[in-house]
């Protein structure tokens, strides 16, 4: 490692302050800080001395995503191969999924980091590590057969409009990965919905079906749905869907990593699942109240939690510290409303069965308002206590 350190120091000389390539220094420093701990410290202002910097936080989230990513690669291959042959080997399925998914990850990182580097050079500041997570999240929430150029355009929109337009890492009000998915969903709806986009090559081979459970329920209307998957299939992830959103087991493993390392808020995760459960239970109670429901309202409440992208969105996107609520009470409110609205959108508007995307983006917008009113309520309580204490003092005197 010392040899690499020396070579990097030599390579950085033309980019040092005062040299002709000085304006490109942020790009070179980004490579340096990716490999090594930054060799500078803060010089003024209040700061906390801690070993956990932004880079380590982002790496922790990436590690938490790995179980869902690997399973998504395997499931992507399995969903395709299981429909055209009787036996599917583990490595065969994983290889097919990787062949489809790794190019998407490469495009996401290549395009996204290229834009980040360009903005850093233009603005004259260092490259932040925030895109390490976003660059991986974007492919993981896309259909397996989405064209790479659509991934690239979605990344461009998310980074430029959803992030850099607000000032870059730490300033965005919307989750960048969900911004990319929303762009793709509304710009190219035929590639983001239907029964031909969730299984590899489904549109090119007769007999290959890729209908998701949410799609089946939404299409059933008031009729009894023909759901062929068991609750165990839904929980384990052996179902069609976005690349890494199907396995609740792998998602919960990632949630455990985030909670134990204190990178993700357990309050947001728990309250979001509670909110989704409450809304689903309300819909399940409609038939007992004499109100006719549909396939989505009659779907068991606990199964709402393990289908679609609800679990993945709650664990990895609702907990985004930049776009989420910051106060402790605000996190409970923020998470509860995300889960509540996700199921509500899913049931009331079957055209958007993946309601978690819209629910998180909606609450991203309202997160500052939630924190404001939580803080204001606390200020008002302190004022009342101050007035009460002042009155008691006067009485005692």
Image (cartoon, rainbow, N blue to C red):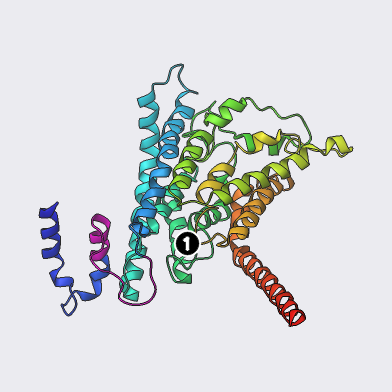
Q: Describe the element under mark 1 as helix, strand or loop.
A: helix
What residue is rendered at 33% in x and 77% in y?
44
Residue 217 lies in quadrant: top right
Q: Who is closer to the viewer here, 31 or 145?
A: 31
Q: Position of residue 375 (x, y in %)?
A: 63, 69
Q: Is residue 104 above or below residue 322?
A: above
Provide the residue span drawn in magenta.
28-48
Around disc 1, counting alpha carbons within 10 Å, would you say few (fewer than 14), some (14 to 19), or many (20 or more)?
many
Residue 351, image x, y percentages: 68, 47
Kindly report the secondary structure that dominates the magenta region of the rendered protein.
loop
Rendered residue at 60%/37% (across/down): 307
Whether residue 216 can be seen here: no
Residue at image location 75% in from the left, 38% down from the top: 297
- Residue 29 colored in magenta in the image: yes
Q: Position of residue 240 (x, y in %)?
A: 54, 33
Identify residue for label 1. 157
Left or right of 96? Residue 380 is right
Task: Single out the residue that lies furthest toward the top.
Answer: 86
Q: Is residue 59 above or below residue 216?
A: below
Residue 244 versus residue 352: which sits nearer the camera? 244
The C terminus lies in which quarter of the figure? bottom right
Q: Residue at x 21, y 75 (%)?
A: 22
**Place of residue 268 in the rendered image (x, y in percent of width and height, measured from the top left):** 58, 51
Residue 134 lies left or right of residue 213; in this view the side is: left
């Amino acid at each position: 490692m010392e040899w690499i350190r020396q070579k990097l120091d030599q390579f950085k000389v033309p980019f040092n302050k005062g040299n002709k390539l000085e304006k490109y220094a942020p790009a070179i420093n980004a490579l340096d800080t990716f490999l090594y701990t930054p060799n500078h410290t803060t010089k003024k202002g209040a700061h906390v001395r801690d070993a956990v910097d932004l880079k380590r936080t982002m790496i922790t989230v990436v590690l938490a995503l790995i179980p869902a990513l690997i399973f998504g690669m395997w499931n992507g291959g399995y969903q395709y191969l299981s429909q055209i042959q009787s036996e599917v080997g583990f490595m065969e399925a994983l290889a097919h999924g990787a062949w489809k998914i790794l190019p998407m990850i490469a495009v996401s990182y290549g395009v996204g980091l290229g834009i980040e580097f360009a903005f850093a050079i233009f603005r004259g500041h260092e490259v932040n590590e925030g895109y390490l997570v976003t660059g991986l999240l974007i492919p993981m929430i896309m259909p397996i057969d989405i064209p790479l150029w659509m991934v690239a355009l979605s990344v461009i929109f998310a980074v430029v409009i959803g992030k850099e337009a607000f000032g870059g890492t730490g300033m965005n009000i919307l989750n960048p990965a969900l911004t990319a998915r929303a762009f793709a969903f509304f710009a190219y709806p035929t590639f983001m919905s239907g029964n031909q986009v969730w299984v590899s090559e489904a549109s090119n081979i007769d007999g290959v079906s890729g209908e998701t459970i949410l799609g089946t329920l939404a299409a059933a209307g008031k009729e009894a749905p023909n759901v062929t998957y068991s609750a165990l299939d839904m929980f384990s992830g052996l179902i069609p869907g976005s690349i890494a959103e199907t396995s609740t087991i792998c998602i919960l493993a990632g949630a455990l990593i985030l909670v134990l390392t204190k990178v993700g808020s357990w309050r947001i995760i728990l309250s979001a699942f509670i909110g989704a459960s409450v809304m689903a239970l309300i819909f399940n109670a409609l038939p007992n109240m004499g109100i006719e429901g549909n396939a989505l309202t009659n779907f068991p409440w606990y199964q709402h939690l393990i289908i679609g992208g609800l679990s993945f969105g709650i664990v990895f996107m609702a907990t985004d510290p930049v776009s989420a609520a910051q106060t402790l009470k605000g996190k409970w409110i923020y998470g509860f409303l995300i889960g509540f609205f996700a199921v509500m959108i899913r049931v009331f508007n079957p055209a958007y069965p993946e309601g978690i995307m819209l629910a998180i983006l909606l609450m991203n917008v309202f997160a500052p308002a939630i924190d404001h009113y939580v803080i204001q309520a606390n200020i008002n309580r302190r004022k009342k206590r101050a007035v009460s204490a002042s009155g008691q003092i006067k009485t005692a005197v």
